[in-house]
Amino acid sequence: MLIRYGVSTGFTSLGSVKNCMLASSAVFRRQQFLIRSLGGYSDHIDSRRMQDIRSMSGTTFEADAENVMREITSVLDPSKHKGQAGKIAVIGGCREYTGAPYFAAISALKIGADLSHVFCTKDAAPVIKSYSPELIVHPILEESYNISGLEDEERRCISSKILAEVDKWMERFDCLVVGPGLGRDPYLLECVSEIMKHARQSNVPIVIDGDGLFLVTNSIALVSGYPLAVLTPNVNEYKRLVQKVLNCEVNDRDAPELLQSLAKQIGGVTILQKGKSDLISDGEIAKSVSIYGSPRRCGGQGDILSGSVAVFLSWARAKGKATTSQMNPTVLGCIAGSALLRKAASLAFKDKKRSTLTTDIIECLGRSLEDICPAC
Amino acid sequence: MLIRYGVSTGFTSLGSVKNCMLASSAVFRRQQFLIRSLGGYSDHIDSRRMQDIRSMSGTTFEADAENVMREITSVLDPSKHKGQAGKIAVIGGCREYTGAPYFAAISALKIGADLSHVFCTKDAAPVIKSYSPELIVHPILEESYNISGLEDEERRCISSKILAEVDKWMERFDCLVVGPGLGRDPYLLECVSEIMKHARQSNVPIVIDGDGLFLVTNSIALVSGYPLAVLTPNVNEYKRLVQKVLNCEVNDRDAPELLQSLAKQIGGVTILQKGKSDLISDGEIAKSVSIYGSPRRCGGQGDILSGSVAVFLSWARAKGKATTSQMNPTVLGCIAGSALLRKAASLAFKDKKRSTLTTDIIECLGRSLEDICPAC
């Protein structure tokens, strides 16, 4: 990771995907040598490149996450009405998994979204509803076991109905989160592919995590070239994605270059690579978030992250060009989501230590955000 | 039990299971008489035997539980990723019982495991899920009432599917807990027997409690000769086990010898005999844990214990030979699990007195562990 290996990277316009990492890394080291030799900036290095180099070095590569949060967090205003602070929908929750979509959806509310929906299977819905009366849970998805024995025509008919049901709501959502607790049932994933296509047609941003990444890794066209897609892979999901898209192995030393190549190769999607430091790139720039979080690795923290990124992304998008950083709202959303989760995890860990669970972290989201940008 | 009756035992290499307890006990009493008569140690008693006697007396027979916990508890390290602090699975939960598997599974998380799964019947799943979004609950087991009227072939087909479903996960688990809220349905127990066989083939440790002990007592071959099996019987379960395996009655005076014989006879499984003091043996050594717990005997504490033992056993096994005590990781897991439950029960009782429930004790697991080995 970046912190462990120091800053050894330079970002150039990336050409050949396979070789670029080594090349750009070598160029950057050469440039660093030149700077040191000349005791300052060399005329031989053009000023734009120098800016790139400086932005890669030391603290400037690390995102100014707190400022980003302050800049994009929705202002609370009594004249606003319900929905204006964000309407999020989580697509996930099946017979096996119910906790993950709940974590993502409730996190969105705890950060400040006004409405949080979950679209899940019929089996999962009563359970998810029972976790919290705050969520709007739609029991509409189907898994293969529930429609076995049906003719193809009937199955297609059910798919269409599911899609029509989601479509009724699509335009109202500021962001979809696809994947928490989705499972890997082929019929269900086929339906979710269609939902993603419709979201894309409606220009609704999509944050993709968990089994959503399994789906996307096998059908990269679903997100390829869609600048409002955000992928949030963990170590293993990232490895699979790199193997599939770049046909190479992950190399920690050149992590930021590889990430940037990957994001570029998928046509400018934003990727938040989770790790000791989170790395974020949209193919154009790369940022890291290294605020100390917690050493607990209990399952569910990724779900908090996906819900958080969805809210911040929606807020950043609503601000449009009003942000001074001029960064892509998807990147801003990732920076803020990553930083908030880390702060909340750190607070929860202070209190609960080894017994920290995901629900404890969720309970700290509000206070963490308040510490950085007070509501009033 | 040990505290009540004082130290009246000696451990020798045990030969004939039925007669050894009486024999060794008689020898030991004779030796004690000799020591008293001579006002010290007698040259007529060989030094190895004396060492045995001394190690049985006072504090050395009592496990140094806090040190064991400190030694085996997984180190929290930000560079670790999800799953590395333990992945536990509880096999249990049926139409009748849903609390027990929840207690075992949530205790594992509260102690510091990263992921906790429950494999239960379809009826039990929504309820167990609703207790906590932190658990991953698989609704896959079947009871006879649900498959009555089916042909043998169909029943076998369902069994195979259940087994295949568990097998998909088996290699990922660091430990199984079989029994909490399992019930005694014959069809279900048949499936669970198969699951245990597969776990054994994969070298996954198995902690067996509750109705899992009913199953094992009637099919001792399931665990016989498997050094990664841990049985955690209460008074009655222990009586049945002794009757079945050693064909004799339990005798409190020679409790540790009997326990050691039993563990040896079952081929070196580890047994944690629950009581006023918990006695633990793997057939080679015996240890007691007598830290004061609580006088409350509300149901569910055994489930906390089974989940705790599973986590500590996994950690001890991961440390391998790095532990200075050189004890069997199953014994270390039992010592730590027993001590932690007792400490947590004591803390909960201080606060809640007569109204102490199992959930109150679970809430004290984190603080109890933190008191002994601080997270950082």
Image (cartoon, coloured by chain):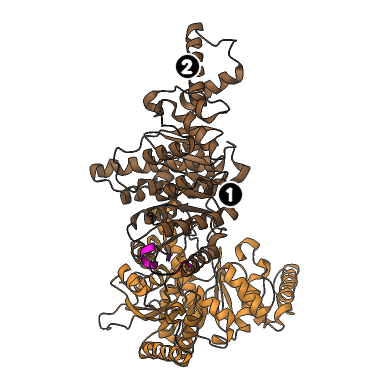
Chain colours: A orange, B brown
Task: Kindly identify the residue that appears in the image at 70 percent across and 84 percent down.
Answer: A15
The total number of labels drawn is: 2
Q: Which residue is mark 1?
A: B318
**Quick one: SS at disc 1?**
helix
Q: Name which residue type carries label 1.
A: Ala
The quarter of the image holding the C terminus of chain A is bottom left
Cα gap from disc 2 to disc 1, whole angstroms: 41 Å
Task: Kindly identify the residue that appears in the image at 47 percent across and 26 percent down.
Answer: B59
On screen, residue B315 versus residue A169, left or right, reads right
Disc 2 chain ID: B
Task: Kindly identify the residue that appears in the image at 46 percent across and 89 percent down.
Answer: A151
Badge nearest the viewer, 2 or 1: 2
Q: Height in image: A45 above or below B362?
A: below
* Residues at marks 2 and 1 on the same chain: yes
Q: Name which residue type carries label 2.
A: Arg
- Percent position of residue A67, x then y: 45, 72
- Percent position of residue A208, x then y: 50, 78
On screen, residue A250 versus residue B293, left or right, reads right
- Percent position of residue A275, x then y: 56, 65
**Membership of B149 in magenta stretch:** yes
Q: Height in image: B33 above or below B337?
A: above
**Quick one: SS at disc 2?**
helix
Q: Height in image: A321 above or below A61?
A: below
Task: Kindly identify the residue that appears in the image at 37 percent across and 67 percent down.
Answer: B146
Residue B375 shows in the view: no
Q: Which residue is mark 2?
A: B29
Disc 1 chain ID: B
Q: Quadrant of residue B121?
A: bottom left
- Compare residues A27 and B170 and report the one nearer the observer: B170
Label 2 vs 1, first from the N-terminus: 2
In the image, which residues are magenta?
B140-152
- Compare residues B333 and B8 and report the one nearer the observer: B8
